Image: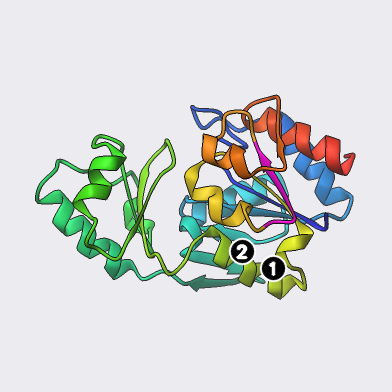
Amino acid sequence: MRAIAVDIDGTITDRERRLSLEAVRALRGAEESGVPVIIVTGNILCFAMATSILMGTTGGVVAENGGVLYINDEVRVLGDMSKAERAYSHLKGIYPVRKVPFSDLRVSEIALTRDVPADTVREALSGFDVEVYDTGFAIHLTDPAVNKGSSMEILLESMGLGMDDVMAIGDSENDLEFIEHAGFRVAVANADPELKAIADYVTSAAHGEGVAEAVQRFLGV
């Protein structure tokens, strides 16, 4: 594997969003051995960039579920925010939905608190041009023209790499698109069943400890 792509929430963090020191050590070890780490997340770009900088990763960032890319010191907005805004306007007229904190910093999608069940949100928005992801931390209304996988391919191309060169690690339904086409697919032990079903390897440990397990086992760092 020539690169690692990894999700943040629920993958390198626990349910309380506390960062796993084991995952940090393993991913930093990969970087030090010449394997760049790509952050692939539904979080806003500034949060993802802070995570990348503090961890010492160099592979770039896919944020907002593929709606935003950070490549070679350049920010690219790929998702159409207006699609999410139309869906949200409809949704808030019938349900008490709320945006997550710092939503004013989102530029390509809308993320909601999980006060209204995801299936209810999907049903209410069935006629809208949006993808609805439930990450277990928030419900995301995204432009279906982009996702973590399609945006990661753009990032990899800029690095001279392809999806076959990547070990991808995740836990939730919004990770499916970037994991299913990766060269080596890893689901942490706490991952959604559909992610485990397509994984080449399911870790015995959950969250960040599972990330460390996979990196150490398959990259030897």
Q: 191 left or right of 88?
A: right
Give the overall secondary structure of the magenta segment.
strand
* Stretch of the chain drawn in magenta: 182-187
**Label 2 sits on residue:** 152
Name the image quarter holding the N terminus: bottom right
Rate crowding at label 2 as few (under 14), some (14 to 19) or many (20 or more) other CA atoms within 10 Å: many
**Label 1 sits on residue:** 156
Q: How is the image coloured?
A: rainbow
Q: Secondary structure at mark 2?
A: helix
Tell me the amino acid under the disc marked 2. Answer: Met
Residue 163 x/y as whole percent: 71, 63
Residue 81 x/y as whole percent: 33, 67
Image position of 169 with respect to 182: above or below: above
The picture quadrant where one finds residue 141 is bottom left
Per the model, the C-alpha gap separating discs 2 and 1 is 6 Å
> Do the CB atoms of the residues marked 2 and 1 lie less than 8 Å apart?
yes
Does residue 70 belong to the magenta stretch? no
Residue nearest the viewer, comparing 164 with 31: 164
Which residue shows up at 61% across the image and 64% down it? 152
Does residue 184 belong to the magenta stretch? yes
